Image (spheres, grey):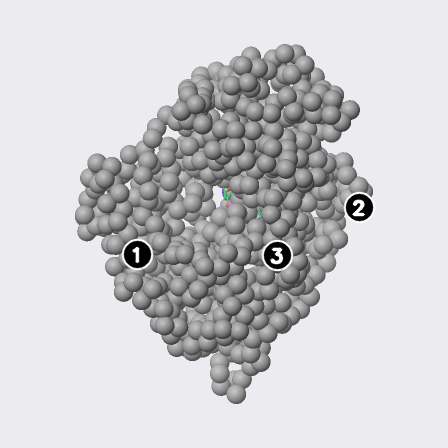
Amino acid sequence: MFRASAADGEITGVHPDRNDANPSPVLGNIPGSVRHRSRIAGPAVRRGWLENGPGPCDLRGNDEFVAVSWDELTDLLATELRRVVDTFGNEAIYGGSYGWASAGRFHHAQSQVHRFLNCLGGYTRSVDSYSTGATSVIMPHVVGAHWKMFSRSTSWDVIAANTDLLVAFGGVPVKNTSINHGGTSNHPTQDALTALRARGGKIVTISPLRDDMTGAATWLAPIPGSDVAVMLGLAHVLATENLHDTAFLDTYCTGYDRFERYLLGHSDGIPKSAAWASGISGLAEQTIVDLAREMASHRTLVTVTWSLQRVKSGEQAPWMGLTLASMLGQIGIPGGGFGHGYGSMNEPGLAPVPYPLPTLPQGINPVSTFVPVAAVSDMLLHPGDECRYNGRRLTYPDIKLVHWAGGNPFHHHQDIGRLRRALARPDTIVVHDPYWTPMAKHADIVVPSTTSLERSDISCTRNDPLLVAMHPAVPRFADARDDYDTFAAVAEKLGVAEEFTEGRTSGEWLRHLYRQWQGYLASAGVTTPTFDDFWVDGSFRMSTEDGLTLLGDYRKDPVAAPLRTPSGKIEIFSEVVDGFGYDDCVGHPAWYEPDEWLNGERAEAFPLHLIANQPRTRLHGQLDHGATSQASKVQGREPIRLHPAVAGAYGVADGDVVRVFNDRGSCLAGVVVDDGMLERVVQLSTGAWYDPEDPSDTASMCKHGNPNVLTADVGASSLSHGCTGQHVLVQIERYDGELPPITAFDPPTIVTRTRIG
Ligand SMILES: Nc1nc2c(c(=O)[nH]1)N[C@H]1C(S)=C(S)[C@@H](COP(=O)(O)OP(=O)(O)OC[C@H]3O[C@@H](n4cnc5c(=O)[nH]c(N)nc54)[C@H](O)[C@@H]3O)O[C@H]1N2
Ligand SMILES: Nc1nc2c(c(=O)[nH]1)N[C@H]1C(S)=C(S)[C@@H](COP(=O)(O)OP(=O)(O)OC[C@H]3O[C@@H](n4cnc5c(=O)[nH]c(N)nc54)[C@H](O)[C@@H]3O)O[C@H]1N2
Ligand SMILES: [Mo]
């Protein structure tokens, strides 16, 4: 959350809340963003689509656009939606439209597109997220909850005051706590870690990158992807030295005995000992033994970042982390137990608001067809094929029209070459975005959206006390429109205006949503200002549930507050998961060798392990052209961090450019040498806008440094099909050729009607 200053229709400065302990550096990207040359100035249609009509086309991403009027755009969009619905049915529309957009409860782009498509009779939807694709499927089986693991996590205050030993798998990267869904008014993570240390608490950070933890900590760096083996090694020490809490396991968990047979090697002949874990992870056996003993003798919090589940077999790290914490028996005790997502987002550790938030109703989707969100290319390429998901067999629908509003697949999806081939299949692709992102450049119908800086909205989020009146900071840019107004106009042409708008303008919707929310709070005995007072005051402070301990209620009374699992307990062995019969996700947490890891066969050809993590300098691909993001680039390319030994071996130094490649693709990146990482690990964050050297070639090198040209488009397992983009094996070479100019932020060629005759 910030205040903006503006002049001449542009943001000139941003000012975080006075009380914010550690404001987000990402805000530095906002000044200058509204009138940036990459803004979409008006409606546009891809020339080939306009001339030849809808149909599969591999010119997408390599064609000119034609500027059209809003009337024409609305007509074309309405006619095409009608054609697809009448000819193929609503299932042929993919409205999964995954991704972030901007803060604000009403103009939230996904809610808008889903509500609109529901008014038209529905759409094929996506389920789960790129953030927690594996967690969101496994955790409901294991603890009967998914998002509550984060939103009702043990608060930072409780951790700072009670935790003696924080064992953080993936560290607690403060860079990621810049961000929260819907906005955030305070960033307490850094201070909480400092307070914990000041009290004498100790931190062990387990990560390939040292700076995933700031401040004093013991740093252990197992090879990426081996954490589950390390956790098993720790568990083996607990079990064999009788340091595990059998009373907790008996009372609060089910299936420990089944898991223990695997742990001790009774079921497969392989004891998962510290020595075994050492062989897999590269950590010393004694280090694992000592850590296990230390964990058993202290108030210990085991945390796992979301990145650990954004890999092959991603279900296992959170499941095994919880199992390890269960063996320590401290779940539900202040400062002990388990945490998932500290340092992944600002939300975990912050106190939740105990009532609902203002929400735009999305309506009901009459189409039941869905796909796991990270199966988008599979779905587009292979209609009719089957996909295994959480005990079901799904059939991919035959998608004719893709409707995207909010989100950028060229940021979020893996194997961009394959994604481009998939995007060539449908008849029509519609993209709403404020900017000419690579996704907008691959669209047939381009809808110019406003940004949150140009419209009125209400911002708030589950774990933040402030409800904020978002006043427009600048007038609308050029011919951009609010997504709501676009959908309302198309709904009008299609005869569903009343259903979509309910007769309200966007201003009237804000009042309506606010009043509805006031009603909820009134029934909870909370008085709130009138909308007009709220709008003038600028914010309203809600109460929060402070001092939470994750699963504290369950610990207090497991009978009165059972978990929503079949047994009502923590399921270390899940009969349900076991019953699915998947060989890549059995009924208890287990070690599965990944494809993309340094001890595997692929490492012979591609000997470096690339970590494609979240960027410190921006939110995903958003505002990559902003000052903070641009300041980090090396010769205009996204920075890749290399260990000095690797830099030496490849003959490169700070400021050089390398070509990063594997059998899926290649990109350029700018070298930053850093000894704070495991050797043979290289780090290239996501978010550089995809910038192919030759746009006609789906395998073309990305000049800018988007790691998703390299990542594998495979799901985490048959259970979740979660995103696995965090890890990929690569090779690098020094790039001595002439550096091609960055063109990612240039709009495509836009011709006027007269020129095409
Ligand atoms: N390799 C690899 N890939 C990853 C990850 C990884 O760890 N490694 N992480 C994954 C994760 S966790 C995530 S969440 C995804 C993120 O992927 P996305 O959420 O798809 O990425 P963003 O760049 O945030 O895309 C948001 C888009 O919304 C647009 N937008 C902003 N405001 C509005 C609006 O009002 N209306 C409309 N119509 N559009 C708007 C922005 O301009 C931007 O283009 O990436 C995933 N991809
Ligand atoms: N500044 C900023 N913050 C963000 C975002 C952003 O784009 N920018 N995106 C937000 C979103 S949508 C999400 S979902 C969250 C994502 O939150 P996460 O997925 O947790 O974030 P990442 O930065 O991808 O990964 C965290 C760290 O995990 C470490 N790691 C990677 N692989 C391994 C491994 O195998 N073992 C161990 N032990 N550690 C490993 C990496 O060193 C990495 O820095 O971040 C959010 N926060
Ligand atoms: Mo995410």
Q: Amino acid at mark 1?
A: Ser
Give the percent coordinates (x, y) of residue 166.
53, 23
What separation in Å lies between label 2 and label 3 (alpha carbons)?
35 Å
Mark sitting on residue 106? none
Q: Is mark 2 within 8 Å of ligand 1?
A: no
Mark sitting on residue 456? 1
The answer to whether residue 683 is above or below residue 499 is above
Q: Determine the secondary structure under disc 3.
A: strand
The answer to whether residue 717 is above or below residue 692 is above
Look at mark 2 in the image and give the residue it sits on. Answer: 605
What separation in Å lies between label 1 and label 3 (alpha carbons)?
41 Å
Mark sitting on residue 395? 3
596, 455: nearer the viewer = 596
Q: Residue at x 52, y 37 (%)?
A: 140
Q: Determine the secondary structure under disc 1.
A: loop
Q: Residue at x 27, y 65 (%)?
A: 503
Residue 309 can be seen in this image = yes
Q: Amino acid at mark 3?
A: Thr
Pointer 3 local density, CA inside 10 Å: few below 14, some 14–19, many at least 20: some
Q: Amino acid at mark 2?
A: Ala
Residue 222 can be seen in this image = no
108, 738: nearer the viewer = 108
Labelled pair 2, 3 in contact (Cβ < 8 Å)? no
Q: Report which quarter residue 1 is drawn in.
A: top left
Give the percent coordinates (x, y) of residue 29.
45, 51
